[in-house]
Image (cartoon, helix red, strand yellow):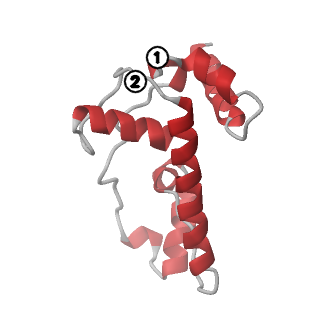
Amino acid sequence: MRAYLSLLRASKTGHWSHESYSGLPVSIETQAFIDYARRYDAFYAGLRLNVSSLTGREVIYEDLLAEPLRLRGLLEFLGVKPHMCDLRPFNVRQSNDSLSQVVINYKQLCAELKGSEFEQELEIDIRATHAGAG
């Protein structure tokens, strides 16, 4: 859902990297999101299938600097000594907003996605929002 939210916000602002769009509200049309999510998941499933015979590692960009051990493991896999390089992010996160803060029709979206495979992502967002507030 975050990828779709990012797409909507970048499309609305024209800022695809390096500029914040924190606080920019958007409305998410449920069926458009579901269609996007299925295409997105199918794309990455196809990539995984096509490279399954290769030796490799799947890397989530956002996790690399958030989890130093993951970055260290990747560097070791690549044969690079971690102490020999000073890696820094080129792109920074454009927003740290929770879904509930910026999705105008958040309650409607939650109701329409209840019982779907996307409900868990909304619940994670709700828990993270409450944890950050308290």
User: Residue at left 65%, top 35%?
Assistant: 121
User: Residue at left 27%, top 45%?
Assistant: 17
Residue 81 visible in the shown view: yes
Residue 90 percent location from the top left of the image: 29, 54
Indicate the quadrant where residue 114 lies: top right
User: Residue at left 49%, top 56%?
Assistant: 64
For label 1, count other residues whose C-alpha is less than 10 Å away and answer few (under 14), some (14-19) or many (20+): some
Name the quadrant of the C terminus.
Answer: top right
Q: Which residue is mark 1?
A: 104
**Among all residues in the image, which is located at the extreme front?**
31
**Mark 1 near mark 2, Cβ–Cβ under 8 Å?**
yes
- Real-space Cα separation, disc 1 to disc 2, in angstroms: 6 Å
Residue type at mark 2 is Val
User: Residue at left 59%, top 23%?
Assistant: 109
* Towards the viewer: 51 or 63: 51
Q: Secondary structure at mark 2?
A: loop
* Towards the viewer: 73 or 30: 30
Up-down: is 123 above or below 19? Answer: above
Residue 59 percent location from the top left of the image: 53, 63
Up-down: is 5 above or below 73? Answer: above
* Towards the viewer: 110 or 92: 110
Q: Secondary structure at mark 1?
A: loop
- Apparent side of residue 18 relative to residue 39 in the rendered image (left or right): left
Q: Which residue is mark 2?
A: 26
